[in-house]
Amino acid sequence: MGVEEWLVSAVMSMYTGAKTVVRIVYGNSSGFEVKVGMHQGSAYSPLSFVIVMEAISGEFRVALPWELFYADDLVVIAETEEDLIKRLSEWKNNVENSGMRVNINKTKVMIS
């Protein structure tokens, strides 16, 4: 994607050794290291998600208006349920082949 090495190193340093806590009614949990995924609540996370998705999906995506990235979400639009299932399956396989994980249980479908 043409990103200079110093910028890649700067982003990597933000994630190396990062810790977080979980806020609950009774206070915060003990800190624990974040080893996978995007940092929740970080202003940089949505941007980095879009950059990574742009880089890995260039060879298989269809483009606007059929596919949209928003923050850390992907919207896939299709004209039939069969097309939607096929396209979601293609996205899942391609993204997972790039080393990412897809939680299909969080998938929502809207029919209009």
Image (cartoon, grey):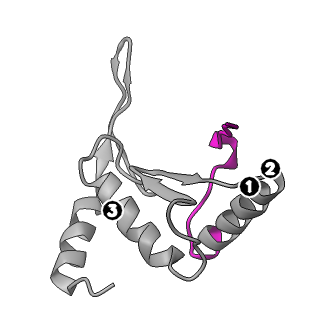
Q: Determine whether 43 is above or below 27 in the image.
A: below
Is residue 75 located in the magenta-colored stretch of the structure? Answer: no
What separation in Å lies between label 1 and label 3 (alpha carbons)? Answer: 26 Å
Left or right, residue 57 beside residue 28? right
The C terminus: image quadrant: top right
Q: Residue furthest right?
A: 82
Q: Residues within 10 Å of mark 3 (few under 14, many from 20)?
A: some
Residue at numbered disc 1? 84
Q: Quadrant of residue 20?
A: top left
In the image, residue 57 lies at what x, y percent? 53, 74
Q: Nearer the viewer, mark 2 or mark 3?
A: 2
> Where is residue 56 shown, x and y percent of the image?
50, 76
User: What amino acid type is highlighted by mark number 3?
Assistant: Ser
The amino acid marked with disc number 2 is: Glu
> Residue sitting at 78 percent across and 59 percent down?
83
Q: Which residues are magenta?
A: 96-112
Sequence-wise, which precedes: disc 1 or disc 3? 3
Q: Is residue 35 left or right of residue 17?
A: right
Q: Residue 108 got which mark? A: none
Query: Label 2's element?
Result: helix
Q: Residue furthest top?
A: 26
Q: Are marks 2 and 1 in contact (CB under 8 Å)?
A: yes
Residue 48 is marked as 3
Residue 30 showing in the rendered view = yes
The answer to whether residue 37 is seen in the rendering is no
Pointer 2: what residue?
81
Foreground of the two, 91 or 21: 91
Q: Secondary structure at mark 1?
A: helix
